[in-house]
Image (cartoon, grey):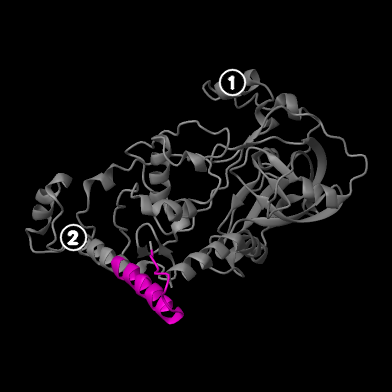
Amino acid sequence: MVSIKEDVSYPELISEVRRHIQAEKTSDLEASKLSQDILLGGKRKIDSQAGSSKAEENGNSNGKKNNVGNRNPIENQIPRFRDYTPTTVPVATIYTENEHLGIFTIPPAIKTPVNRRDNTKYCRYHRDIGHITEECRVLKDEIERLIQRGQLRNYVRNGDQQPRQPAQENQQPEQEGEDIEVRVIIGGPATGDTNRARKNYARQARSEPFPHQINLAEHKNKAPRLSNKPIIFTEEEASGLWHPHKDAIVVALRIASRKVYKILIDNGSSADILFQSTLNRMDLVGAKFNPIKSALYGFTGDSIHSEGVLNLPVELGTHPCQHIQSVEFVVVDCPSSYNAIIGRPTLNAIRAVTSTYHLLVKFPTVGGIGILKGDQQASRDIYEAANRSSNAHRMNIMTQIA
């Protein structure tokens, strides 16, 4: 706190403020240097209460520096969680607003070598480069640990007080500093709209299948004879793409005679999804929804209820290797960078085989092997658009530490 005398002049006031700012910067610098000395296995020793002096002596007895360092043992006690309690603000904001309370444990050192890290990203929790604070998995685990202890509850989203279970010890930790994409959607009408139907669907996999009887009731004799040519992918089909890449398969399809772009092919989704904003632009007069009880669940456990189910024809491939499939879309009203998602129900129905390396989807048709080509540029444009908000947050962090 800065105390100012009543008779101080304006230049003296400015000088006093600058002196306090410089003192705070010096204090932070000394704390950072101390942390680095511990990180590099220097001769500084932690107080005996930490119980790590013996470990430090063993780590330095061979005359070599430990890249990981011997820090406060409590840092290794931060549990890993599979999912996290939803909060009202980003984790970086929670840390910034509560850092002065001293409730956060010292994080373990970043294991990735410095020369392999992104030096444009800075983590305020680790006080090191490699990833931004908002992407720090260790900080997310630490905040979740504090929430489970009854702290930071003012940041918990209303109505969500369910305890999160720590991950198993043998579970492999995720690499820090890497961009992680998780596109998993669970739910929908594919496995039934009641608990009984979903349980029966799960039990079915425990019994032995009957290859010669499967799907006879669905296909019968009137089913068209599809091509039995093998589906293969060649290296030539991967030409024309930027390699290596991490792009998703994004295609354009005709849905109900409307050309719809930015459609994600997602093997991880148990439902075919059409977003309400897309449906509005399609201007389908007289479209009728069928009610649905099932909710959709994301990888964080958050759920969203749909507007209903809508059956629409989808044209896949080009003539003569073309197939028209009636797709049961689950309509949801939420923001998305995609217009629709084609998930496992449709991919399995058309017997599709996907290759993310080739950005291709192949499936048998009466006229041969049908092909859907992914648009690499569209995939990257969507990814960039989806990260614009987070990039603004990153710039704010970099401005604070500059």
Q: Magenta region's main secondary structure?
A: helix
The residue furthest left is: 61
Q: In the picture provided, is 93 more to the left or to the right than 214? A: left
Which residue is the site of mark 2? 66
Q: Which residues are magenta?
A: 2-27
| Number of residues whose C-alpha sits closer than 10 Å to that of mark 2, classed few (under 14), some (14–19) or many (20 or more) | some
Q: Quadrant of the C terminus?
A: bottom left
Q: Does the magenta portion include 231?
A: no
Residue 366 shows in this picture: no
Residue at x-position 59% and y-position 20%: 199
- Residue type, mark 1 in image: Lys
Task: Residue type at mark 2: give it.
Answer: Asn
Q: Nearer the viewer, residue 138 or 202?
A: 138
Give the mark, 1 or 2, whose residue is nearer the N terminus.
2
Quarter holding residue 158: top right
Residue at image x 43%, y 52%? 95
